[in-house]
Image (cartoon, rainbow, N blue to C red):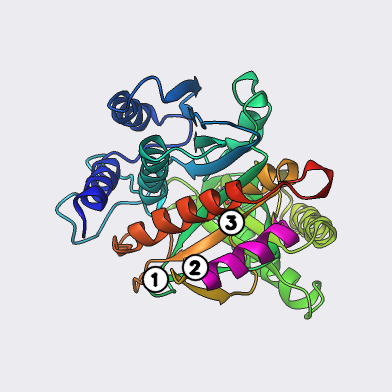
Amino acid sequence: MSTEIQTFVEFRRQLHLIPEPGFAEFKTQRFLLDRLAELPADRIEIRTWRTGILVKVKGTAPQRTFGYRADMDGLPIEEDTSYPFRSVHPGYMHACGHDMHMAIGLGVLTRFVEQPMADDLVVIFQPAEEGPGGAKPMLDSAELRDWLPDLIVALHVAPEYEVGTIATRPGILFANTSELFIDLTGKGGHAAYPHRANDMVVAAAHLLVQLQSIVARNVNPLDSAVVTVGKIEGGTKQNIIAEKARLEGTIRTLSAETMTLVKKRIEALVAGAETAFECTASIDYGSNYRQVYNDETITREFMEWLEGSGGAKLIECTEAMTGEDFGYFLERIPGLMFWLGVDTPYGLHHAKLEPDERAMPVAIDTVTGYIRWKSEQPLREGGKP
Ligand SMILES: CC(=O)N[C@@H](CCC[C@H](N)C(=O)O)C(=O)O
């Protein structure tokens, strides 16, 4: 590995040490600002927005602005990797590759500082991708509004693909998402007197099983949807009937219509649980992300460029039920997201996730190579990038 790449691998390891929750990426922001301070000040402009950062790398004769976006937050997972640089924040881990996405961002912007292109580049370090979602408020911020790129690229590490591969597709890449929080309130009591209480652990257990029937029995089998309950809480002690229970989950669909259908069915089942278990219930859909929809023309062109570049191996993949608030960027700015193969047996959001760092030069070369090539192409009809 070259000394240049070793620098960014080291940055990734230092970021890996300090995973932080969404909108609390204070040390992460400090670390990135310190690295940016090491670059020539006349070549870049820096803005901060909450815990995020925007960096403009000035072009020599700018006609348009290209963008690269990296997410910044970690996940509430107790790390169980074999790394000597494990998280120093107990119960928090970079288990979704954001440490790598950020270090690649530093690599991309450093390359354009050292070898300028004609156009401007804006690198966006965005907080709170895992929730509650930093993309939408950042896009609405005064800090980003007058630096909006004309074309934007983002990537996501993919454990299932080999190092040296990149996977993407024109059109929908990631699903629509909605968080799901259901609170049930009944009547607590003594474990020996169930007839005098309304047990919310039992209500939650029934509801949990009923929720599985939505995908199995309400969604068209030729469509796709996910209802996952990732956390369930209820009760206070083994011999006390639970007055309260809470289910926390997420819904994924490939269309807005199916999202509406799934939510309608959840509401019907929750209303049924209220009747069946004589309790009250509330539903909160938390944060919702728009699907990641890759601009079809730009993505086809990127795929053709990649195949001709002699760089990474291209895979045209299918859609995934993962979510990403990068979907909000793609709703306003043409561009694309791609999967970066990091070949590791454990999946995203797993305590043992160890993405292969040899994927970092592949990503830096691909993003810089594509943006530089694209910057050299004439504007399309209508001034489109
Ligand atoms: C790439 C990835 O794993 N993204 C997350 C996004 C989470 C959105 C939201 N908090 C939710 O759970 O609905 C994912 O879980 O797909």
Q: Is residue 112 visible?
A: yes
Q: Position of residue 323 (x, y in %)?
A: 60, 55
- Image quarter of the N terminus: bottom left
- Graded by Cα atoms within 10 Å as few (under 14), some (14 to 19) or many (20 or more), the crowding at tag 2 reads few
Q: Nearer the viewer, mark 2 or mark 3?
A: 2
SS majority, magenta: helix
Give the camera-side residue of 383 and 276.
Answer: 383
Label located before the other in sequence (2 or 3)? 2
Q: Residue furthest bottom?
A: 221
Q: Which residue is mark 2?
A: 309
In the rendered structure, which amino acid carries the disc numbered 2?
Ser
**297 inside magenta stretch:** yes
- Graded by Cα atoms within 10 Å as few (under 14), some (14 to 19) or many (20 or more), the crowding at tag 3 reads many
In the rendered structure, which amino acid carries the disc numbered 3?
Met
Mark sitting on residue 164: 1
Label located before the other in sequence (3 or 1)? 1
Mark sitting on residue 337: 3
* Contact between labelled residues 3 and 2, with CB atoms less than 8 Å apart: no
Label located before the other in sequence (1 or 2)? 1
Q: Position of residue 171 (x, y in %)?
A: 73, 63
Q: Is residue 73 left or right of residue 382?
A: left
Q: Which residues are magenta?
A: 294-309
Residue 307 drawn above or below residue 71: below
